[in-house]
Image (spheres, rainbow, N blue to C red):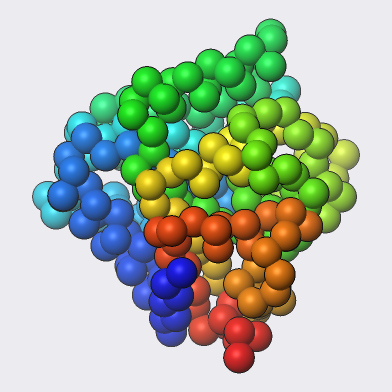
Amino acid sequence: MNVIVVDDYMQLSDTVAKIIAQRVQSKKDLVLGLATGSTPLGMYQELIHMSKNNRVNFGQVTTFNLDEYVGLSACDPQSYCRFMQEHFFDQIKVKRSFIPNGLAPNLAYECLLYESEIKRYGGIDLQILGIGRDGHIGFNEPGSACNSRTCVVQLDDITIRDNARFFNNDRSRVPRQALTMGIETILEARECLLIANGAHKADIVARALRGPVTESVPASLLRNHKSFTVVLDKAAAISLG
Ligand code: GLP
């Protein structure tokens, strides 16, 4: 595990964008796993900036997002599909982008399909991940099996509470279920990169990186990966000792 600690959110976004750009430069048809949430927003901004200045070209890159809410259409303002459109794909042209379809009539089939698309593109080269305050990665909540594949999951109360900020702070509007790449799907990526910023993440970051490797803290399972990098700002790293 390689842990990089930078001063602030701007440096974090810059560092992660540079790592991604470097991977795209060395493999034009990179298969890139993407994440949503507030943490990667600065990284997306920086990638857009780099692309507009011709410092990176995503034209041959294929992307796979980690997760999507069940029951939200692609154009729902709170769907991850719309989030990606707004914050990245509207301004960056990639070859093809995949996001699980939370409105698929048969969700179990949609999960199988997602897995087979990942396989068809040769697997994910680099997976970007945020971390939930309960240690979730994607939407794999505490207790998720380390051999789980893309599946339908129930969201924990803490996740519903945290994500209510995207739904006008109305918890009742947050979907109770989501589709997510499984832990094993994520660990099969050739490289994993976890990012976290802010003091509110310090405790879970310390549990994930210094505590036991356990399914109770899904992010800790990333330590079993042979190519795992963590980029933190100072505030998120404060409890690492
Ligand atoms: C959501 C996403 C996760 C993300 C997490 C953290 O629940 N499913 O993939 O890592 O939020 O979000 P934030 O970056 O806003 O703290």
Residue 54 screen position, x and y as percent: 12, 50
Q: In this view, does 177 lie above or below 24?
A: above
Left or right of 218 on screen, residue 232: left
Q: Kindly identify the residue that appears in the image at 22 percent across and 47 percent down.
A: 24
Q: Kindly identify the residue that appears in the image at 83 percent across and 55 percent down.
A: 158
Q: Kindly identify the residue that appears in the image at 34 percent across and 43 percent down.
A: 125
Picture quarter containing residue 75? top right
Residue 193 visible in the displayed image: no
Q: Is residue 114 above or below residue 19?
A: above
Picture quarter containing residue 119? top left
View extreme (left): residue: 54
Picture quarter containing residue 216? bottom right
Q: Which of 4 and 148 is in front in this view?
A: 148
Residue 202 visible in the displayed image: yes
Left or right of 49 on screen, residue 190: right
Q: Is residue 32 above or below residue 1?
A: above
Q: Kindly identify the residue that appears in the image at 52 percent across and 22 percent down.
A: 114
Residue 129 screen position, x and y as percent: 52, 53
Image quadrant occupied by the C terminus: bottom right
Q: Number of numbered discs present?
A: 0
Residue 165 screen position, x and y as percent: 72, 53
Left or right of 3 on screen, residue 96: left
View extreme (top): residue: 105
Residue 123 screen position, x and y as percent: 38, 33
Q: In this view, does 219 lie above or below 124?
A: below
Q: Which of 54 and 233 is in front in this view?
A: 233
